[in-house]
C-alpha cells in the first residue's frame, strides 16, 4: 500500500503560518531567538571540535578544514563581489585583523580540546574585558572607574577559575585566554576601519589568512578522516558561519541591552553538553569563577546599554 502524497498546499500554508507567527513577534523577541540560536550553534560547534580532538585529529587539521568549508559556504558572496571583495583603502588593517582572528581560531580549537567544555565557554566571556583594555590602548577611548572596577573583578574571576600556581592549573586555560584576546583584537580593529568597508571584504581576508596560515601544518599532520569525521568537519565550517550570522541578525533585530544577556545561555548549554556527552562535572572553582566573570561582563553590558540605549549594535563578522 503506497503512502499518500504530501499535500503541497498544506505544507505551503504551514510555512506561511510560521512566517506570520515570526513577524508577529516583537523585534526584541526575534533578536533573542537569533541569539539563542547562535549560542546553541557555537556550543555545538565547540563540542564537535572537542570530539574530533578526542578522536586524534590535530588542531591545525580541524582549523584548516573549518577555514575551507567556511570559504565554500561564502563562495557565492565572494563570486558576486569579484575582485571587489579584496579592494580596500586599508588592506594592512584587514590583514592584521585576519591574522589575529586566524590565530584566535587555532588557539580556541586547541583549548576546547583540552579543557572541560563549561570552563572553556566561561573563559570566552572575558572578551568584553579584553575589549575594554584594547579600546583604551588602540581607540584611545575614555573608560570610567565603574567599568574599570568591573573589568578588574572579571579578571579576578579568571584567576579564581584558572588558579595559576595550583596543582590543578592547566596551561590550556592560558591558550583559551589567548584565543579570546585575539578575537577581542579583531573586534576592536573593526572600529578602526573607515566607513564603507563591507562585511564581504572582512570575511574574504579572514578566509584567505586562515587557509594560508593553517594549510602547511595541517597537511604535515594530516590524518585521513573517516566519513563521520568529514561530516563533523563540514558541520564545524557551516555552523561557525551560521552562528556568526545569527549574532549579527540578533543585534540588528533587537536592542543590545535586551539581546546580549541571552548569550549567557552558552554557559548552561556547555555545562549540559559537557555533562551528557563528555561526562564532565565543573568543580566549585570553575563555577565560582564563571559567576564572577559573567556578573562583571553583564554589568559592563548594562552600563554600555544605559549609555547608548537606542543603538542596536551589529556584531563584527569573524567567520
Image (cartoon, rainbow, N blue to C red):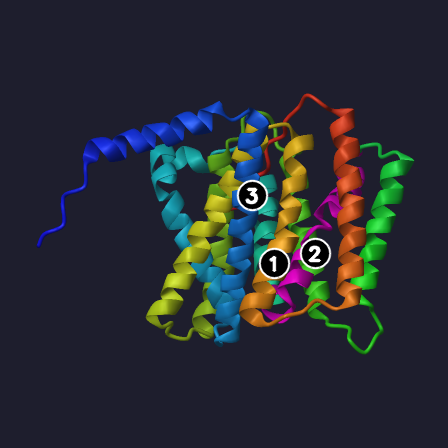
Q: Quadrant of residue 134?
A: top right
Question: Percent position (x, y) of residue 183?
Answer: 64, 49
Residue at image coords 60%, 67%: 275
Question: Is 264 positioned to the left or the right of 19 in the image?
Answer: right
User: Principal SS element in the magenta part?
Assistant: helix
- Crowd tier of the residue under label 1, counting other residues whose Cα lies within 10 Å: few below 14, some 14–19, many 20 or above: many
Question: Percent position (x, y) of residue 142?
Answer: 84, 32
According to the image, label 2 marks what residue?
122
Question: Is 38 positioned to the left or the right of 229 in the image?
Answer: right
According to the image, label 1 marks what residue?
270
**Callouts 1 and 2 close, C-beta under 8 Å:** yes
Residue at image coords 68%, 40%: 261
Identify the mark nearer the N-term, 1 or 3: 3
Q: CA distance from mark 3 to mark 2?
A: 16 Å
Q: Is residue 117 shown in magenta?
A: yes
Question: Percent position (x, y) of residue 249?
Answer: 52, 33
Q: Quadrant of residue 254?
A: top right
Q: What span is colored magenta in the figure?
A: 112-140
Residue 40 showing in the rendered view: yes
Residue 139 showing in the rendered view: no
Amino acid at each position: 500500500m503506497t503512502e499518500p502524497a504530501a499535500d503541497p498546499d498544506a505544507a505551503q500554508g504551514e510555512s506561511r503560518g510560521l512566517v506570520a507567527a515570526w513577524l508577529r513577534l516583537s523585534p526584541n523577541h526575534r533578536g533573542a531567538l537569533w541569539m539563542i540560536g547562535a549560542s546553541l550553534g557555537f556550543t555545538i560547534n565547540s563540542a564537535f571540535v572537542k570530539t574530533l580532538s578526542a578522536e586524534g585529529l590535530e588542531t591545525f587539521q580541524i582549523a584548516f578544514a573549518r577555514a575551507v568549508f567556511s570559504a565554500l559556504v561564502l563562495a557565492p558572496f565572494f563570486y558576486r563581489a569579484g575582485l571587489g571583495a579584496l579592494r580596500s583603502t586599508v588592506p594592512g588593517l584587514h590583514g592584521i585583523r585576519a591574522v589575529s582572528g586566524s590565530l584566535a581560531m587555532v588557539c580556541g580549537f586547541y583549548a576546547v580540546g583540552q579543557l572541560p567544555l563549561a570552563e572553556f565557554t566561561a573563559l570566552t566571556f572575558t572578551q568584553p574585558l579584553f575589549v575594554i583594555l584594547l579600546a583604551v590602548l588602540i581607540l584611545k577611548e575614555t573608560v570610567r572607574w565603574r567599568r574599570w572596577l568591573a573589568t578588574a573583578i572579571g579578571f579576578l574571576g579568571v584567576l579564581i577559575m584558572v588558579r595559576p600556581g595550583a596543582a590543578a592549573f592547566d596551561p590550556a586555560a592560558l591558550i583559551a585566554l589567548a584565543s579570546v584576546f585575539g578575537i577581542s583584537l579583531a573586534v576592536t580593529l573593526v572600529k578602526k576601519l573607515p566607513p564603507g568597508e563591507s562585511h564581504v571584504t572582512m570575511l574574504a581576508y579572514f578566509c584567505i589568512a586562515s587557509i594560508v596560515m593553517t594549510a602547511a601544518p595541517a597537511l604535515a599532520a594530516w590524518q585521513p578522516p573517516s566519513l563521520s569525521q568529514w561530516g563533523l568537519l563540514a558541520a564545524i565550517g557551516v555552523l561557525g558561519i551560521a552562528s556568526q550570522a545569527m549574532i549579527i541578525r540578533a543585534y540588528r533585530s533587537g536592542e543590545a541591552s535586551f539581546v546580549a544577556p541571552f548569550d549567557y545561555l552558552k554557559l548552561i548549554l556547555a555545562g549540559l553538553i559537557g555533562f551528557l556527552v563528555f561526562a564532565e562535572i565543573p568543580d566549585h572553582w570553575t563555577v565560582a569563577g564563571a559567576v564572577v566573570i559573567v556578573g562583571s561582563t553583564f554589568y559592563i553590558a548594562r552600563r554600555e546599554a544605559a549609555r547608548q540605549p537606542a543603538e542596536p549594535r551589529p556584531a563584527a563578522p569573524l567567520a
